Image (cartoon, grey):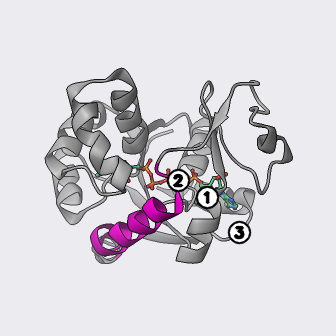
Amino acid sequence: MRGRIILLGPPGAGKGTQAKWLVEKTGLLHLSTGDLLRDEVAQGTELGKNARAFMDRGDLVPDDVIVEMIRGRIADAEGFILDGFPRTVAQAEALARITDVDAVVYIALDREQVIVRLTSRRVCRDCGRITNVLSDETASDGTCRTCQGELYQRDDDCREVIENRFDVYMSATAPLISHYRDAGILNEVDGNRPPDAVLAEILAVVEGA
Ligand code: AP5
């Protein structure tokens, strides 16, 4: 399937969860700037060392670093699901100079739900599965249900950093909602529903893109 799709929404809205399922259903390339940055940090690269302080505080990594990191990956792709990019109007303008976008899916979730979800999120160190101790009983013992790998809590999933991430989202990223609405490609989805209901709605957008 083709399609150049952006998943937009606050931290914890379910962008990563939905992107992984969309890849299974559509075969599109998933590009998560958060995952790419965490890989750079884990590998100890210069980019990772510079990005880490921003990420630990829940602030945005500078636009030029992000655009250069992702430019080559997007330029040659026939279709993609962008998760966590763009996050500022400057990033959206840079993206528009690289490629067209077919649809933007804005997954809406309020601050209270964001905090509940992120303080209880766990991620598998081996297969990358995203889960939550509130909905997955087996997650509480720290073992991934899919691959038996170790589940961990992201460093930026502590309450103080989550609150800053939400504030940063509201000031720097939320303006993209009207940016893409004005462009006529915004599709709003209520993220405060069961994950499969959210997926069905997003799939309908992607298939129509
Ligand atoms: P990034 O990794 O992109 O974090 P984020 O945007 O804050 O998003 P999250 O990964 O926290 O949430 P999500 O929406 O993917 O939710 P998930 O599916 O996991 O960025 C991290 C940092 O990197 C940034 O702070 C910044 O420093 C830097 N960065 C990244 N991109 C950048 C950029 N473009 N520019 C500058 N800096 C950048 O779900 C959350 C939880 O909810 C899980 O536990 C899940 O199981 C659960 N859940 C999901 N869906 C549902 C549902 N429908 N119902 C109930 N629970 C659900």
Residue 110 seen in the current view = no
* Three-letter amino acid code at the position of disc 1: Thr
Q: Is residue 165 magenta?
A: yes
Tag 2 or tag 1, which sits nearer the N-term? 1
**Label 3 CB sits under 8 Å from any ligand 1 atom:** yes
**Label 1 CB sits under 8 Å from any ligand 1 atom:** no
* Three-letter amino acid code at the position of disc 2: Asp
Check the image and report above or below for 30 versus 204: above
Taking depth in this image into account, of 28 and 2 the one nearest to the observer is: 28
**Label 2 CB sits under 8 Å from any ligand 1 atom:** yes
Are the residues at dot 1 and dot 2 in contact (C-beta closer than 8 Å)? Answer: yes
Disc 3 versus disc 2: distance between alpha carbons? 21 Å
Question: Residue at left 76%, top 25%?
Answer: 148
Magenta stretch: dominant secondary structure? helix
Question: Residue at left 37%, top 72%?
Answer: 167
Residue 64 picture location, percent across and down: 14, 46
Residue 35 picture location, percent across and down: 43, 38
Q: Give the residue at the far right of this rendering.
A: 137
Tell me the SS state at disc 1.
helix
Question: Residue at left 43%, top 60%?
Answer: 161
Residue 94 picture location, percent across and down: 16, 52
Residue identifier under label 3: 193
Q: Which mark is residue 119?
A: 1
